Image (tube, rainbow, N blue to C red):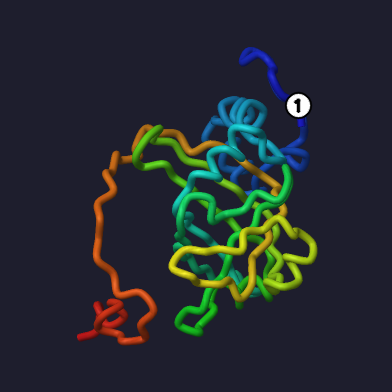
Amino acid sequence: MRRGRRATEVDERPAAELPGSTGEHVLQEAHGTEKRARRFYDDQVLDHLNTRMREFIARMEMAFVATADGGGECDSSLRAGPPGFIEVLDDHHLAYPEYRGNGVMASLGNISENPHLGMLMVDFTEDLIGLHVNGTAEIVEDADLRERHPELPVEFDRGRTPERWVVVEVEEAYIHCRKHIPRMVPVLRKRSWGTDDAKRKGGNYFTE
């Protein structure tokens, strides 16, 4: 992928060679945004994680994860943990842990049918910036990933141990601009960790 081209240059690559979907390329042409979009592709979209992206991921405490099943039905979910809970394995791979949850496994179920996954990580407190990572995901059992990556941490927040990991091979990594990102301030909150009681953990919040 070519980088560092002047904004006045026109990208003559066919749409099939560009990042993104056929649909977005068709709409860019229909609405006259092709040049702006191609500048974005050339200047912002990488096929790997650069140094600043790796540093950004290492301090993230949450990520929004989007998946879809084999029929295209979508699901979005939140993953959270202490800074660094998302492990950057190398320039082309990252992994996040999956712990014991409600047993539904909606995201993992989708990945088992359709490996395409999108992640959005946002810094709401310091730099007010976001990072998109799109790629293909693989579900790996904890012991198997540790065999491949013995440097993985052995101590986890509140003593939780991952049951498995989602390993993402990066296809696209690009910025989410700060224009509409609100600034937030973290506060201490009391939580009922390690409980299956629906009321204490808020599992019945929307029940009538």
Q: Amino acid at mark 1?
A: Arg
Quadrant holding the N terminus: top right
Asked whether residue 30 appears in the rendered view, the answer is no
Residue drawn where x is 29% and y is 39% of the image: 183
> In x, y percent, where is residue 187?
25, 51
Would you say 71 lies left or right of 176 here? right
- Vertical relation: 128 (above or below) 9: below
Element on which disc 1 rests: loop
> In x, y percent, where is residue 91?
72, 42
Quadrant holding the C terminus: bottom left
Count of numbered badges drawn on the protein: 1
Residue drawn where x is 76% and y is 71% of the image: 144
Q: Quadrant of residue 166?
A: bottom right
What residue is shown with label 1?
A: 2
Q: Nearer the viewer, residue 14 or 47?
A: 47
Callout 1: 10 Å neighbours few (<14), some, many (20+)? few
Residue drawn where x is 28% and y is 69% of the image: 191
- Vertical relation: 97 (above or below) 119: below
- Vertical relation: 195 (above or below) 23: below
> In x, y percent, where is residue 14?
77, 35
> In x, y percent, where is residue 201?
30, 77
Asked whether residue 102 appears in the rendered view, the answer is yes
Q: Nearer the viewer, residue 203 or 66?
A: 203
- Vertical relation: 111 (above or below) 152: below
Q: Nearer the viewer, residue 188 or 29?
A: 188
